[in-house]
Amino acid sequence: MTPAELAEVIRAKAQGQGRFLTALAGPPGAGKSTLAAELVAALGQGAKAVPMDGFHYDDAVLLARGARDRKGAPDTFDAQGFFHLLRRLRVEDEVAIPLFDRDLEISRAGADIVTAADRLLVVEGNYLLLNEAPWPEAAPLFDLTVWIDVAEHELDRRLQARWAHYGKTPAEARAWIDSNDMPNIRRVTQNSRAADLNIRWG
């Protein structure tokens, strides 16, 4: 299914409704941000991406908790803050959202605004469908759920390229993927609930 085809599905399901929230879930390296951007472009005016990554705990918090080396695991996100944002998006016309700055490795509060004109929201993140507490609390807040299915070897290749781009040596990237990314990939792949739609992406 192409972004244009998925956009048609969303338009059809959202017709006659208020703000419509589509969950775009998948493991690290699945291409969620890229697909979300292409989907928003295909949907056109009134569509906006809302990334879950804005709810990363700061590195200082993770260091204090002894969790910096697990950054990206389910418990290294402010899940309740994220759920609160989703609830606000369902009832409030204008909502400020945080965005994660990967170059600086920090979340920036109020980095973007969902306006009253933004009716088709594409919410993307690793754990939107994770069937482990507290993540199932998000389930009733989505109108449509989509799982991005990518082969593990392709995820590995993409993650090596990602970490090289952000300055890790091949050995550093390999160590991070093996100790952090791959456990998260397997956890979310094995423990996520079924989505309304499954799509192959790469």
Image (cartoon, helix red, strand yellow):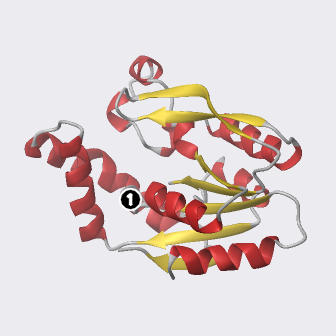
Could you tell me residue 73's position as x and y percent? 44, 43
Could you tell me residue 104's position as x and y percent? 37, 26
Residue at horizontal 51 percent and vertical 82 percent from the top: 1
Q: Which residue is mark 1?
A: 185
Residue at horizontal 80 percent and vertical 70 percent from the top: 14
Could you tell me residue 147's position as x and y percent? 54, 70
User: Residue most toward the front?
Assistant: 45
Label 1 environment density (alpha carbons within 10 Å; few <14, some 14–19, many ≥20): many
140 w.r.t. 110: above or below: below
In the rendered view, does 110 fall on the left or right side of 155?
Answer: right
In the rendered view, does 97 fall on the left or right side of 86?
Answer: left
Query: Which is nearer the eye, 47 or 19?
Result: 47
Query: Which is nearer the eye, 70 or 91?
Result: 91
Residue at horizontal 78 percent and vertical 56 percent from the top: 119
Query: Which is nearer the eye, 197 or 191?
Result: 197
Q: Secondary structure at mark 1?
A: helix
Could you tell me residue 131's position as x and y percent? 61, 60
Q: Quarter of the image holding residue 82?
A: top right
120 w.r.t. 151: above or below: above
- How many badges with numbers are in the image? 1
102 w.r.t. 178: above or below: above
Name the image quarter holding the C terminus. Answer: bottom left
Residue type highlighted by circle 1: Ile
Q: Quarter of the image holding residue 182?
A: bottom left
Residue at horizontal 32 percent and vertical 74 percent from the top: 151
